Amino acid sequence: MQTFAEAMPTILKHRGVWEGVYRHFDADGGLIDRHRTRIRCEYPETGPYAYIQYNHFMWDDGREYRAELPGVFRDGRLWWDVPTFHGYAWETRDGIILLNLTRKDEPNANFFEMIVLGATGEHRARTWQWFRDGQLYKRTLCDEHLVSRD
């Protein structure tokens, strides 16, 4: 059986705390939303989860949102089933992480995410393509930098 580290070696380089900005655009490129983020990526050595992501989103008007997103490794992929979405991630031979996620909180919506880590391992870019009823309706750009390897 393939281990998590064998199937997804690059994802382990994402361990730590990342800060950045998420920008959501409509299908025509108009800005819908912008907020700051602090994301912590953990890889527990024991327990049921191979990965836990802690999200903290912050808007300029004072709103905040927090989420804990535990994932399990099975069949060569990282799987999530959390209150807002379910789906999986895998890694290409070139170290690009791809996700296919179905929203639970938005009827008939899903998105595909691509995560690319910069050569130094201190910057990453995430791009989401959102579909509803099979039609593109939104894109998200996430620009993040590593704050610590906690």
Image (cartoon, rainbow, N blue to C red):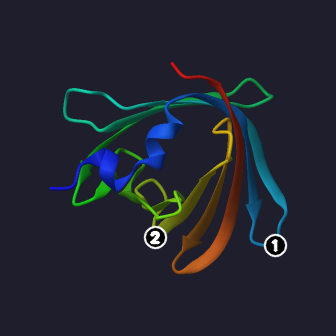
Residue type marked 2: Asn
Give left or right: position of 142 versus 51. Answer: right
Question: Percent x, y for residue 126?
Answer: 64, 52
The quarter of the image holding the N terminus is bottom left
- Of residues 90 and 86, the one nearer the viewer is 90
Q: Residue visible at 63% across and 39% down?
A: 121
- Of residues 71 and 132, the one nearer the viewer is 71
Quarter of image, res 86: bottom left
Residue type marked 1: Asp
Question: Percent x, y for residue 74?
Answer: 22, 54
Marks 2 and 1 sit apart, C-alpha to C-alpha, by 20 Å
- Kindly identify which residue carries mark 2: 108
Question: Percent x, y for residue 113?
Answer: 55, 60
Question: Percent x, y for residue 111?
Answer: 53, 64
Q: Residue visible at 70% across and 39% down?
A: 144
Q: Residue visible at 49% across and 66% down?
A: 110
Q: Please report contact status of discs 2 and 1: CB closer than 8 Å, yes or no.
A: no
Task: Identify the mark at residue 28; answer none if there is no mark.
Answer: 1
Q: What element carries label 1?
A: loop
Q: Where is 120 relative to 75, above or below?
A: above
Q: Is mark 2 on a helix, strand or loop?
A: loop
Residue 37 visible to the viewer: no
Q: Where is 129 relative to 43, above or below?
A: below
